Image (cartoon, helix red, strand yellow):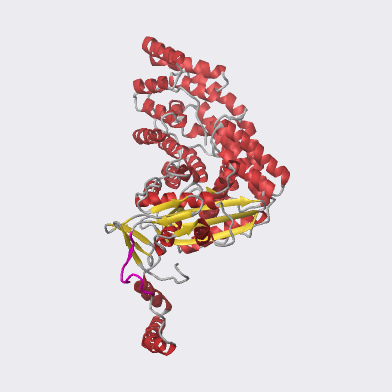
Amino acid sequence: MANGVQTARVYHFGAFTVDARTGELSQGGRRTPLRDQAFQVLLALLEQPGELVTREELARRLWGADTFVDFDRGLNKTVNHLREALGDSADQPRFIETLPRKGYRFIAPVTRAGEDAGTAPPADPPRASRVRRWLPLSLMLAGGLGIAIGAGVGEARRWMNGRWGAAPRISALAVIPLENLSRDTEQQYFADGLTDALITDLAKTGSVRIASRTSVMQYRETKKSLKEIGRELNVDAVVEGTVMRAGSRVRITARLIQVSTDMHLWADTYERDVREILDLQRALATDIARRIDVFVKPLDRARVVNPEAYGLYLKGRYAFHEYTSDGWQQAIGHFNRAIETDPAFAPAYSGLADAYLVAGAYAAIPTEEALTRGKAAAAKALQLDDGLASAHYALATAHTWYDWDWAGAEREFRRGLELNANDSLGRNWYGGYLSLLGRHDEAIAEHERARQLDPLSLIANANLTRALYWARRYDEAITQARRTLELDSSFGVALFWLEGSLRHMGLFDEAVALRQSISDPEQAAIIERLYQRSGFSALLRACGDTYRKNGLLETAARCYAQIGETNESIRLLETCAEHRCSDLVGLNVEPDFDVLRGDPRFEELVRKVWPAAGQTGPRMAPSITLSSQPRP
């Protein structure tokens, strides 16, 4: 805008062209990706070439007069992004000159297409002229619409879409981590928590695939282009934005961008009291869902939330997603304090259930404690709010691993899928349940869906390996395990299933070498001596003895089963059954126990866990087991 007059122009400078009408920056005929705020700064400078454009002017243009953002940081980041797109430098500028503490000036020659320098835009024609000019067109439109209405509303819509272009087709979406505009790094959990909440709410609104949190969080402060992000996550559009919390107020600015064209499809700003943050999240998710033209499932009206409880809940989620023993312990503490602050805040109980169950699966806390407390927390969450998909998934998992209540687990999983089919963690747990039932094709499909939702998640990729292993598709399991290890070469769960798959393919040398590679030097030397001197059976016996001493009875039983010590193996499994060891749910599908199938004592154990005898797999050659089995 210059001198209060706004015109739509095409600007040329250097090798660049800017079309203010379409919002495009191009170089040599090729579009150059540029985010909306950077484009607005560029327009402001091009409208007043050679003149100072103050920081205050730019701030008002970008954020409006009722300022609620960190201007300095936001504007500096925007100008840096603009300079990167133009190949410019603050030290030796060709286009944008910085005037310290004042603003910026565009210093390159600028021409405007179709307009002579110094020529003002033509004045509006008199009213009568405008009427005469638009009357024929108005009659034509009225006649055309009348015909369209006569042919049917559906045909009219198709005609309009054909004339002006239909909304872009979006079948997959990613939410890039919201930028924390606060200078307080302690508030990072708040921005990440709102990102996570937005992902969850979007996932519940319709059928579009929403990339999960684990995969998108790596793009916080990334320098990758939106096209690169879209290609890596296999999505059509992204949501990016900022969050600012000041006192009792919170503001979120969000933009929806089509990655193939870098086109801004929608943008808006939301501000609420922090007590109404749940309502803000739902309003934002609903608006985005409607903009991408999907059927929007109605979201329940959000309750007013205690700000302190909500902050503790976000800290809990932030710690949970570290995926470490310390992180889960911290998460449990934060969730419990949130519950103490607001005993009616259902999401805190749901988060507590997730933390207990996942920590128990990775032996960060005792299994029985994890399952009993996780189940109780999930049940309480659903008592307060039956619409929490994550709580249904958690309760279903407790029914599976602790209660052995297969009908109850199926019911809860189905309810979770109805509420949120885009929950990657829930689909992971459901896939494991289907594997335990022997429904291997369905299980693999569920794990593949979870991996598509969260393509960079280690556990989603590793659990797909497990499903293939339990289905006896060992060659595919080996391939998938190695893909997982490309994300993290030291990820223990993937290494575990890889080692098992190698054994059942008869690749014992490779399996032992793998185990040595992840052992300390002393243990690796012992494994090598036993294997080379006494063979496979001696190594299996040593493993069984060690696991039995350490109380890992189910794992020890698998070692003894492989070397033909059937009585000892079944005795250990019977002891496990007396104590309801959660690992026994795998009796039905674990390949290491194939050598025991047909023994009446083993089949009786299976019936204790499964009301009807489950599927038995093919009998396999003796195999090696060198570590305990991870669970969900």
Residue drawn at point x = 44 percent, y = 17 percent: 540
Q: Check the image and report above or below for 588 versus 152.
A: above
State the image quarter where residue 578 is shown.
top right
Residue placed most toward the observer, 445 or 322:
322
State the image quarter where residue 379 is shown.
top right
In magenta stretch: residue 143: no
Residue drawn at point x = 62 percent, y = 38 percent: 331
Relative image position of residue 272 (x, y in whole percent): 63, 58
Q: How many marks?
A: 0
Q: Outermost residue toward the left? A: 28
Q: Outermost residue toward the top? A: 533
User: Which quadrant: the N terminus?
Assistant: bottom left
Span shown in magenta: 109-120
Relative image position of residue 552 (x, y in whole percent): 55, 23
Residue drawn at point x = 41 percent, y = 19 percent: 516
Q: Check the image and report above or below for 536 versus 214.
A: above
Relative horizontal placement of residue 158, taking residue 342 as reference (left or right) = left
